[in-house]
Image (spheres, rainbow, N blue to C red):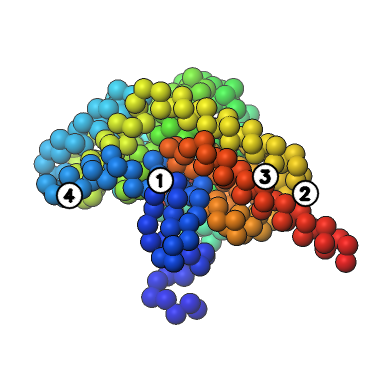
Amino acid sequence: MSGSALYETFARAPLAFDRGEGTWLVTDKGERYLDFAGGIAVNSLGHGHPHLVAALTEQAAKLWHVSNLYEIPEQRRLGERLVDATFADKVFFTNSGAEALECAIKTARRYQFVKGHPERFRIITFEGAFHGRTLATIAAGGQYKYLEGFGPKVEGFDQVAFDDIEAAEKAITPDTAAILIEPVQGEGGIRPVPTQSLKRLRQLCDQHGLLLIFDEVQCGIGRTGKLFAHEWAGVTPDLMAIAKGIGGGFPMGACLATDEAATGMTAGVHGTTFGGNPLAMAVGNAVLDVVLADGFLEDVQRKALLLKQGLAAVADEFPDVIEGIRGTGLMLGLKCAMPNAKVNMALRDQHLLAVPAGDNVIRLLPPLTVTDEEIGEALKRIRSGAKGLTNAIAAEAAK
Ligand SMILES: Cc1ncc(COP(=O)(O)O)c(C=O)c1O
């Protein structure tokens, strides 16, 4: 017991930050950390971005909350902008990624229901997936460690192996409503799904009358160098859950849908108190102002290459620590050759923040606004960390 009043559900690092400046976090003792964790892909524009701060404070001085009983102009505007920028025709705003997924799951089931197929409620998902911590989303993710002890698993999710499209096809039954997939798995260990597989899933859904749902909560909003990761594959879903980066640190999410997929979501069938709140909407619009500005995403792609090439060189130099580099854009993973927790600690000792993921990977998720100099500094710190670990292995072997 820590003696804290808080649930003991988080294994927190013994670090508390007082403020943030772009890609940097500063402790109350004035120690500076280079933030390549980005609040787990949330701080898309770093800390204290002036445009976001202005948007939030201006809105805070005007109006905080009215509920969805009334028109919320900033919500309408953000919805229209997301529609203009994507495959979608309709948007439902939420407070989190899990809620965005809940909305997508409900929308898919409801679609089949109103189309005369109430029996079609099952959703096919993939091993290693992470879709959130609500009862339905832990069932969708299918990971025993998140399901254990929480009573019967919510019915209706069928999981197949990662990127096993043949197995997904075999798993389709007359009760299947949809297929749900992260185009790039985040928590699962930065695993991009091959373009061909996404294309095949689209075909399967069309063939069988299923909805294709993408979870871009982690890989969306410019993270891969396109506004959404699926754009690289040239495949569009029927439904998509987003969150994290769209709020740049302000809690929000959204479920995006085609008109057809949203057919069943009529007045009263779904709702939220806080989703689409004016504060969140002001920030979401401000994030889009920056991410959709001319040249922004191209610059993310350029910087991503710089980081990936630098990481590949470090991996080549220290193969006992880093086995390989994976991922795309500014969503990169170090596949570790030793326990990833150890590597994470070594990076933290270098005052570089990163995030462990499944499959023994360390995630690097810097703000999309990271500079070339900061990338150079991060590479220097990763190299020092890897060198220290390699030296420790050699010292141990010499004993
Ligand atoms: C791909 C993906 N989906 C859903 C979620 C759940 O989002 P939230 O924690 O905001 O509920 C996460 C969170 O890490 C995620 O990475």
Q: CB of mark 1 within 8 Å of CB of mark 4?
A: no
**In the depicted structure, whether residue 224 falls above or below residue 132:** above
Look at the numbered disc 2 and give the secondary structure of its residue.
Answer: loop
Residue at the spot of label 1? 22
From the top left corner, tell me how far across and down residue 22 is, in percent.
40, 45
Q: How many marks?
A: 4
Residue at the spot of label 2? 320
Q: Nearer the viewer, mark 3 or mark 1?
A: 1
Residue under the point 48% across and 65% down: 15
Look at the numbered disc 3 and give the secondary structure of its residue.
Answer: strand
From the top left corner, tell me how far across and down residue 210 is, in percent.
44, 28
Residue at the spot of label 3? 335
Of residues 265 and 275, the one nearer the viewer is 275
Q: Is residue 11 in view?
A: yes
Q: Amino acid at mark 3?
A: Lys
Q: Amino acid at mark 1?
A: Gly
Look at the numbered disc 1 and give the secondary structure of its residue.
Answer: loop
Residue 60 numbered tag: 4
Mark 1 and mark 4 lie on one chain; the one further toward the N terminus is 1
Residue under the point 86% across and 60% down: 397
